[in-house]
Image (cartoon, helix red, strand yellow):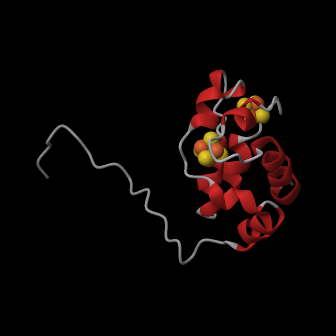
Amino acid sequence: MIDFGFSFSPSSRINLDKADKEKFLSLAALEPDVLKCMACGSCSASCTAGAFEDTSVRKAILSLQNGLSDDAVKLLNHCMLCGKCTMVCPRGINTRHLILSIQKIYGK
Ligand code: SF4
Ligand code: SF4
Protein backbone atom coordinates (compact mmCIF):
# COMPACT_ATOMS: atom_id res chain seq x y z
CA MET A 1 0.00 0.00 0.00
CA ILE A 2 1.25 3.49 -0.82
CA ASP A 3 2.37 5.49 2.22
CA PHE A 4 0.66 8.89 1.90
CA GLY A 5 2.11 10.16 5.18
CA PHE A 6 -1.21 10.16 7.00
CA SER A 7 -3.73 7.65 8.25
CA PHE A 8 -7.47 7.57 8.76
CA SER A 9 -8.79 8.14 12.27
CA PRO A 10 -10.99 5.37 13.67
CA SER A 11 -14.68 6.06 13.17
CA SER A 12 -16.41 7.76 16.08
CA ARG A 13 -19.83 7.03 14.59
CA ILE A 14 -22.48 6.07 17.15
CA ASN A 15 -25.38 3.83 16.22
CA LEU A 16 -28.24 5.58 18.03
CA ASP A 17 -30.59 2.69 17.26
CA LYS A 18 -28.44 0.49 19.49
CA ALA A 19 -27.71 3.07 22.22
CA ASP A 20 -29.22 2.28 25.62
CA LYS A 21 -31.61 5.21 26.18
CA GLU A 22 -33.48 3.76 29.16
CA LYS A 23 -31.47 5.58 31.82
CA PHE A 24 -31.51 8.84 29.87
CA LEU A 25 -35.31 8.69 29.79
CA SER A 26 -35.29 8.12 33.58
CA LEU A 27 -33.06 11.17 33.92
CA ALA A 28 -35.33 13.25 31.66
CA ALA A 29 -38.34 12.23 33.78
CA LEU A 30 -36.55 13.50 36.89
CA GLU A 31 -34.88 16.51 35.22
CA PRO A 32 -36.98 17.54 32.18
CA ASP A 33 -34.73 20.57 31.67
CA VAL A 34 -31.97 18.28 30.36
CA LEU A 35 -33.96 18.19 27.09
CA LYS A 36 -33.57 21.99 26.77
CA CYS A 37 -29.77 21.85 26.43
CA MET A 38 -28.60 23.31 23.12
CA ALA A 39 -24.95 22.29 23.64
CA CYS A 40 -23.78 25.92 23.60
CA GLY A 41 -20.83 25.16 25.89
CA SER A 42 -21.25 28.12 28.25
CA CYS A 43 -21.26 25.72 31.21
CA SER A 44 -18.00 24.08 30.11
CA ALA A 45 -16.33 27.42 29.39
CA SER A 46 -17.05 28.66 32.90
CA CYS A 47 -16.35 25.40 34.74
CA THR A 48 -14.02 25.73 37.72
CA ALA A 49 -12.92 22.08 37.55
CA GLY A 50 -12.64 22.23 33.75
CA ALA A 51 -9.55 24.42 34.05
CA PHE A 52 -7.69 21.47 35.60
CA GLU A 53 -9.50 18.28 34.61
CA ASP A 54 -11.59 16.98 31.71
CA THR A 55 -14.88 18.15 33.23
CA SER A 56 -17.76 19.26 31.02
CA VAL A 57 -21.53 19.34 31.55
CA ARG A 58 -22.06 19.88 27.81
CA LYS A 59 -20.06 16.79 26.84
CA ALA A 60 -21.65 14.77 29.65
CA ILE A 61 -25.18 15.56 28.42
CA LEU A 62 -24.23 14.66 24.84
CA SER A 63 -22.68 11.39 26.05
CA LEU A 64 -25.84 10.52 27.99
CA GLN A 65 -28.00 11.25 24.94
CA ASN A 66 -25.79 8.86 22.96
CA GLY A 67 -25.96 6.10 25.58
CA LEU A 68 -22.32 6.57 26.65
CA SER A 69 -23.05 6.77 30.37
CA ASP A 70 -19.58 5.69 31.58
CA ASP A 71 -18.02 8.58 29.62
CA ALA A 72 -20.55 11.00 31.11
CA VAL A 73 -19.89 9.92 34.69
CA LYS A 74 -16.12 10.31 34.12
CA LEU A 75 -16.66 13.82 32.76
CA LEU A 76 -18.35 14.83 36.02
CA ASN A 77 -16.04 13.01 38.45
CA HIS A 78 -14.12 16.15 39.34
CA CYS A 79 -17.12 18.46 39.62
CA MET A 80 -16.97 20.51 42.82
CA LEU A 81 -20.65 21.47 42.70
CA CYS A 82 -19.71 25.15 42.76
CA GLY A 83 -22.74 26.08 40.64
CA LYS A 84 -21.00 28.46 38.20
CA CYS A 85 -22.35 26.48 35.25
CA THR A 86 -25.91 27.02 36.53
CA MET A 87 -25.36 30.78 36.65
CA VAL A 88 -24.33 31.01 32.99
CA CYS A 89 -26.68 28.53 31.29
CA PRO A 90 -28.72 30.54 28.74
CA ARG A 91 -31.49 27.95 28.90
CA GLY A 92 -31.87 28.37 32.65
CA ILE A 93 -31.01 24.73 33.35
CA ASN A 94 -30.07 24.08 36.97
CA THR A 95 -26.98 22.16 35.90
CA ARG A 96 -25.74 21.75 39.46
CA HIS A 97 -28.96 19.94 40.40
CA LEU A 98 -28.78 18.03 37.12
CA ILE A 99 -25.27 16.80 37.99
CA LEU A 100 -26.54 15.52 41.35
CA SER A 101 -29.39 13.67 39.57
CA ILE A 102 -26.94 12.19 37.05
CA GLN A 103 -24.77 10.94 39.90
CA LYS A 104 -27.87 9.50 41.58
CA ILE A 105 -29.07 7.65 38.48
CA TYR A 106 -25.77 6.68 36.86
CA GLY A 107 -23.48 6.49 39.90
CA LYS A 108 -22.21 3.05 40.85
S1 SF4 B 1 -24.84 26.15 29.26
FE1 SF4 B 1 -26.85 25.11 29.39
S2 SF4 B 1 -27.59 25.00 27.24
FE2 SF4 B 1 -25.37 25.46 27.19
S3 SF4 B 1 -24.36 23.42 26.99
FE3 SF4 B 1 -24.46 23.92 29.19
S4 SF4 B 1 -26.36 22.97 29.94
FE4 SF4 B 1 -26.49 23.07 27.69
S1 SF4 C 1 -20.82 22.84 39.36
FE1 SF4 C 1 -19.27 21.36 38.60
S2 SF4 C 1 -19.54 21.33 36.36
FE2 SF4 C 1 -20.55 23.22 37.16
S3 SF4 C 1 -18.97 24.85 37.02
FE3 SF4 C 1 -18.85 23.96 39.09
S4 SF4 C 1 -17.27 22.36 38.93
FE4 SF4 C 1 -17.93 22.84 36.83
Q: Nearer the viewer, residue 52 or 100?
A: 100
Q: Quadrant of ligand 1?
A: top right
Task: Tell me which residue sits at (64%, 36%) in the image.
Answer: 43
Choose between 44 and 76: the one closer to the eye: 44
Q: Residue at x 63, y 33 (%)?
A: 54
Residues 1 and 10: in front is 10
Q: Is residue 51 left or right of residue 101?
A: left
Q: Position of residue 47 (x, y in %)?
A: 67, 28
On screen, 11 above or below 43?
below
Q: Is residue 45 above or below residue 68?
A: above
Image location (x, y in percent) of residue 36: 64, 57
> Residue 10 in the image: x percent, y percent?
38, 53
Residue reaching furthest to the left: 2
Residue 33 visible in the displayed image: yes
Where 101 falls versus 83 (above or below)? below
Q: Quadrant of residue 90?
A: top right
Callout count: 0
Residue 58 visible in the current orientation? no
